[in-house]
Image: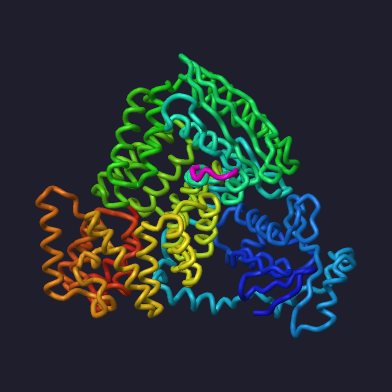
Amino acid sequence: MKSFRLGPWKVRPEISAVINGDEVRIEPQVMEVLCRLARRPGAVVSKEELIEDVWAGRFVGEEVITNAVWELRRALGDNARKPTFIQTIPKKGYRLIAPVKPLGEESAEEDAGLRNTDQESRSAGSGEGGIPESRNACEVSQAEERGRRAGSWIAPLKAHPLSLAAAAGAVLVALALFVFPGVFMPSDADSPPLTIAVLPFQELAGDEYFAQGLSDALAGELARFPHFRVVARTSSRSAAGDQVSLEEIARRLGAQALIQGTVQRQASQVRLTLQLTDSQSGSFFWSQPFEQEDSRLPLLILRAAQEAAGQLAEHYPDVPRPSSQLADEIEAMERRAAVGRQAYEDYLRGVHFWKSRTRGGLFRAVQYFEKAIRQAPEYASAYAGLANAHIILADHFYAPSQPSLEKAHQAAQKALELDPENPQALTAMAWILWVRDWNWGSAEELFRRALRHNPSYSTGHQWFASLLEVAGRTDEAQFHATEAQRLDVLSPIVHITAGTVALRSGRPDAARHSFEKALQLDPHFVEAHKGLFWDALDRGDMDLAFTHCAFVQQHVLEHDDWRPYLLRFQLEDACQPKRIRRVGLREDEFRTLQAHLKGRQERGLFVSPFLWLELYAAAGRTEEASEWLRGAIQARGRHLFYLPQHLQHREEINILKDPLLASQLEHILMPQPRD
């Protein structure tokens, strides 16, 4: 792949970087967009052409192009209002207006070009120069791409219902853009989103969950603006908890503006005082109190969001003012029945415990969401929270999958009846359609619908990335995983998802970086140690593999953790040199683990069919493994989609040669339509 010069920048597609003194790394898809524009400098390239060329005609929303162009402008130091590199042509597409020259051997003339950039820029846009079609620096031949995909375990998915549903999904999603335009719609200016962080509010007297919950709610409302990128609540909370300066908090979060607030409750009134800070100057530029009856707190948050958005638009010229539709929504909310203070507080507590992801925390979350629903039966957000709690209980094997997903489905369905555009409910339903029903096309449609309504919903990006990764659409998966990382930069689990996506796309260095980032944020995070253990083992770094293996084993034993893919760490010598490389189980190891699992069942503890499947597969017992595979398929769960790779690379490979088991694995990859 050839490099080229773009104005003062050297563009290095082979390492996905642009260089002008400093080296700036960009995502591979973003680099492909730049290369596509560089083939025809000065010419307008439509979004449709970019989607066709970069995403090979796969259905993706236009937001991926908008975000890619924004990333390029950020990397190149460009400005959408006064561009020197990429110009937006409203309703048509984009064109590259900076001079483009191929880079062969470095010459004095090329180096001198840095001094003549201003003169060259004035003559840009003539269409001369550029990267010839036959020398496209970013071009990967279709044959190479087919070969890369064919080498993946996911190859059987090429006839998957997700691809069959894509054409119909494209029509439905296009229609949804007109039927459900949302309160805020992006303009053709493609202004770079303003990154804001809502720091946890301070409760002057009372329950900390209440104040933090209000800050979460405000962040959720502001996230509906397409020109805002709202840092996820967990990241804002973690950064603010370190007692550092506002400038340092903004730097850690990459935020251009910070929102702080204090909450005070008096009798039946709640008083919220907001304050906006510009991170560059460190100065406050707006403060205002809001008061509301405590029975109508969602209305308080919506009004505060409207005013804060307007003030941000006043201070930052590239940010448009809120649409008049928001005022209409506030009026509609005023006519609705009040949620009630106690129901709202119970909902906020449920959200708090849901974020813990622990067994005890998730069951407490269920209790609080159900309590909120009993007090406010028409409370859509409480139903959405309940759905998400049951989803995680099933996904983490804290409860049987099928009944948990059925409860999640009922709650999500009720939430959408009450609020058809609730992003949490849409995301929960998308997960259920994917994991339980294997309805890939409809799941994708709902994920996209949720993210259109709330582009800053990090969980939506994270879960959608998992679907796309399993479907073999690794470029799109990487986009959404990276977006989740930006929005929730201090969340370890988000970095784990990004690392997993990078592994599936053949980028071990990027995967290792994500796992290490998760470990930096939480040195005790077992999933980070597990990922780095397998990475070190693959690279032959046995000392490092032993270190991570020992940590995982200690965690497994101390926390009585019997999840799939952690089974081998229950063995006493799991991390010893003679055992650490070996796949499969000896007879004595099999008997030991079998006795443990039977003992758990006798004590009334839930043991997932996945564990039994993994146990018998690792022991090479094909017949029993096949029976438990049928049980796992019936139980349903996201982990079904990872079984082929896990069994092939981590357990007894010969088991895949059994026709019975192989046919059932094909059924996992090629699900049949439900009755």
Give left or right: position of 110 versus 211.
right
Query: Looking at the image, can residue 200 be seen?
Result: yes
In the current view of this chain or complex, which residue is farthest to the top? 267
Relative vertical location of residue 539 with respect to residue 501 in this rendering, above or below: below
- Residue at 55% from the left image edge and 62% from the top image edge: 58
Q: Can you give x and y, in whole percent of width and height, for residue 287 in the image?
A: 65, 28
Decide which of 66, 445 is in the foreground and name it. 66
Decide which of 127, 546 is in the foreground and name it. 546
**Where does the magenta region start and end?**
241-245
- Residue at 37% from the left image edge and 48% from the top image edge: 432
Q: Can you give x and y, in whole percent of width and height, for residue 109 in the image?
A: 85, 81
Decide which of 155, 136 is in the foreground and name it. 136
Tell me which corner region of the image, top left, top right, bottom left or bottom right, holds residue 31. Answer: bottom right
Tell me which corner region of the image, top left, top right, bottom left or bottom right, holds residue 18. Answer: bottom right
Colouring scheme, one of rainbow, by chain, secondary structure, one colour: rainbow
Query: Looking at the image, can residue 457 be seen?
Result: no
In reply to whether residue 666 is colored magenta, the answer given is no
Tell me which corner region of the image, top left, top right, bottom left or bottom right, holds residue 219. Answer: top right
Q: Can you give x and y, in whole percent of width and height, for residue 439 in the image?
A: 39, 53
Number of marks drawn? 0
Image quarter (top left, top right, bottom left or bottom right) of the N terminus: bottom right
- Residue at 42% from the left image edge and 59% from the top image edge: 161
- Residue at 45% from the left image edge and 41% from the top image edge: 424
Give left or right: position of 69 versus 395.
right
Give left or right: position of 395 versus 111.
left
Relative vertical location of residue 24 with respect to residue 213 in this rendering, above or below: below
Q: Can you give x and y, in whole percent of width and height, for residue 80 in the image?
A: 75, 52
Give the overall secondary structure of the magenta segment.
loop
